[in-house]
Image (spheres, helix red, strand yellow):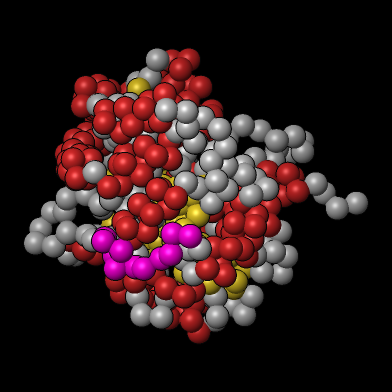
Amino acid sequence: MTPPRWQDVARATGLMGDDGVPRATVFAEMSALAARTGAVNLGQGFPDVDGPASVAQAAADAIAAGANQYPPGPGILALREAVAEHQWSRYGLTWDPDREVLVTAGATEALAATVLALAGPGDEVLTLEPFYDSYAAVVALAGATHTTAPLVATTPLVATAHGFRLDLHALSAAFTPRTRLVLVNTPHNPTGTVLTRDELAAIARLAVEHDALVVTDEVYEHLVLDGSGARSSVHVPIATLPGMAERTLTISSAGKTFSFTGWKIGWVTGPEPLVSAVRTVKQFLTYVNGAPFQPAVAFALRDPDVAAWVVELAHSLSRRRDLLCAGLEDAGFTVVRPQGTYFVLADAAPLGYTDGVALCRDLPGLAGVVGVPVTAFTHAGSDVDRALRSWVRFTFVKRDEVLTQAVAGLHRLHRG
């Protein structure tokens, strides 16, 4: 008998125990550890302060005005138009809001519906590694094979090359005749890498050569952080590269941009045949969601004061990143300074830890802090898994006083 698909998901995400019983994710384990010990939880990436009050008021106004029943299946027109306007004004991408924009229950549903719509048994879905954990799960749900190309920690030769960079030789080798989808995440969770135009061009060239479709996860598109040196990172949607708009589905959401992660309002943009395929699957997942939040997000995408707030958020995150990075370095970690997102990766090997999981379980007692091992974002036993076994991911999307408390705790590791 064929095993139930949930077992494939559990195996793909490392959640199947030796006894065949699924176990909790390391994220759940670390959050429970933080709650139990009172440690500062830098494991989960969500803000501890809400987004703009004007956006929250727009949602409250929508509820009061009666936007409480099912919205249209593709999303309300105002939001689809706002998304299309955003893609044009920011990136010069032209999409028809009626046929080429789809509203989803966050980026997670958008990714799931896309992979389920466009890949299946016999297909390969290529992602970067390390990868956001839901990628492995949805590829397994689709019955496809998950392949990866590594991001590798580099020496800071120049500002734009510092951090985790794409191994272009390994990327080329990862493409096969079965590669159906290439799932690109930039700015990248968990490494904080912002892929360069040259790296994206290499992915685009290989996708065209192998007739593969590209799916991009761009939820951190507006959270590119201030750089050090003459040049800073810039987010480049791969759909803007020559010949890529017709073979790319772009996914983003309001949660990270506006600090309303619980609203779960995302979207997909791209050519009509691909968006139509995703819509066909999506309508049998959530069908619709977030009726009063959709007009609020439409307002947020269009309001100049909210746009200024997002710019200030990125500046604030840059400062908070630097605060946490300095604290981690003082504690003895080797730190790769992220170019975007909410996260920083730190190597615990200089502290004598070769296993990031073990360190994360010890950190509440040692420093009053909780992180997440980077192996939660890798294939068990892969080259990347072995290379990053001693690494830990921490989030800096917390208030200054919380990060200051965490840094003070981490300083105890230095004294030890």
Q: Along the horizontal axis of the image, is 284 left or right of 161?
A: right
Q: Please say whether residue 348 is visible from this viewpoint.
A: no
> Which SS does the magenta portion mostly show?
loop
Residue in view at x 74 percent, y 45 percent:
7
Q: For residue 95: magenta?
A: yes
Magenta-tinted stretch: 88-98
- Residue that lies at the very extreme toward the left in this rendered image: 230
- Residue 158, how many percent across, how many down? 17, 64
* 283 drawn magenta: no
Q: Residue at x 22, y 49 (%)?
A: 225
- Place of residue 42 in the rendered image (x, y in percent of width and height, measured from the top left): 36, 31
Front position in the image: 16 or 199: 199
Image: 74 above or below 273: above
Q: Is residue 63 visible?
A: yes
Depth check: 47 or 250 in front?
A: 250
Side of 372 relative to 142 (left or right): left
Q: Residue at x 70, y 35 (%)?
A: 22
Residue 38 vertical placement versus 236 (above, below): above
Examine the image and state in which quarter residue 81 appears: bottom left
Q: Nearer the viewer, residue 145 or 383?
A: 145
The residue lying furthest to the bottom in this view is 209
Q: Residue at x 50, y 54 (%)?
A: 102
Where is residue 289 drawn, in percent x and y?
A: 54, 38
In the rendered image, which quarter is residue 407 located in?
Answer: top left
